[in-house]
Image (spheres, rainbow, N blue to C red):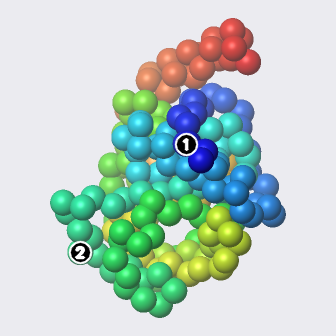
């Protein structure tokens, strides 16, 4: 039996966070191990999503877990056309996800990111999306969702394309983080000089 292990989360300023991920072409046990390690890492950091770039791999792969048993989701979601219990598909791993916006409303929300410790900022995103993806065995799925699940997936898929949540913020929200961002980038640069 192989156990999941916690991985180091890349920080703002590391080049891999700006890299578009390569398509996942190999499915099976190795990808399952990567998913398990990423979920372990995400949970240890109290996150709800983690992209491959955030553990140093430029790959079209991410994990998501917005399952809070004490607070079941009241928003709309359907996996492959059915509303199945969250327990059956959370945490979820998404390979090669493609997000399609469903024309509805957009909302502002105060987002954070594990690669930007102690930073949050308002980001406007579509309220509902349709996501086509493959699971760890390569099987295709379609998830239509809204609420925190839709937002989390959009945030992670941005990562897979080298886009960060600070790129999606309005100038005013970004301005409030300017000093923290410069400090984090400097700390990351210093860390890379020693450990890179």
Q: Nearer the viewer, residue 177 or 86?
A: 86
What residue appears at the point 57 percent right and 30 percent down from the top-left corner? 8
CB of mark 1 within 8 Å of CB of mark 2?
no
Residue carrying label 1? 4
Q: Secondary structure at mark 1?
A: loop
Q: Is residue 188 visible?
A: yes
Residue carrying label 2? 74
Q: Nearer the viewer, residue 165 or 58?
A: 58
Give the image location of residue 31, x and y in percent: 69, 55
- Mark 1 → mark 2, Cα distance in angstroms: 31 Å
- Can you say whether 134 is above or below 83 in the image? above
**Apparent side of residue 10 relative to residue 111 in the rendered image (left or right):** right
Q: Is residue 127 visible?
A: no
Mark 2 Cα within 10 Å, few/some/many (few <14, many 20+)?
few
Image quarter of residue 24: bottom right
Q: Nearer the viewer, mark 1 or mark 2?
A: 1
Image quarter of residue 109: bottom left
Q: Which mark is residue 79?
A: none
What residue appears at the point 74 percent right and 63 percent down from the top-left corner? 27
Give the image location of residue 53, x and y in percent: 65, 43
Give the image location of residue 146, x and y in percent: 38, 73
Give the residue at the far front of this rendering.
1
**Apparent side of residue 194 relative to residue 82 in the rendered image (left or right):** right
Give the residue at the far left of this rendering.
70
């Amino acid at each position: 039996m192989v156990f999941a292990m916690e991985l180091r989360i890349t920080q703002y300023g590391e080049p891999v966070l700006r890299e578009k991920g390569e398509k996942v072409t190999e499915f099976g046990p190795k990808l399952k191990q990567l998913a398990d390690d990423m979920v372990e890492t995400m949970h240890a950091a109290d996150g709800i999503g983690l992209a491959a770039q955030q553990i140093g791999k430029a790959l079209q792969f991410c994990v998501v877990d917005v399952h809070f048993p004490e607070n079941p989701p009241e928003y709309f979601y359907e996996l492959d056309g059915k509303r199945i219990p969250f327990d059956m598909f959370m945490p979820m791993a998404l390979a090669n996800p493609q997000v399609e916006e469903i024309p509805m409303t957009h909302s502002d929300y105060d987002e954070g990111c594990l690669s930007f410790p102690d930073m949050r900022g308002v980001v406007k995103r579509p309220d509902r999306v349709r996501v086509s993806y493959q699971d760890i065995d390569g099987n295709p799925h379609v998830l239509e969702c809204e609420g925190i699940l839709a937002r989390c997936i959009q945030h992670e898929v941005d990562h897979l394309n080298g886009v960060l949540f600070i790129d999606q913020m309005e100038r005013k929200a970004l301005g409030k983080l300017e000093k923290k961002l410069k400090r984090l980038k400097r700390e990351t640069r210093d860390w890379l000089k020693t450990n890179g």
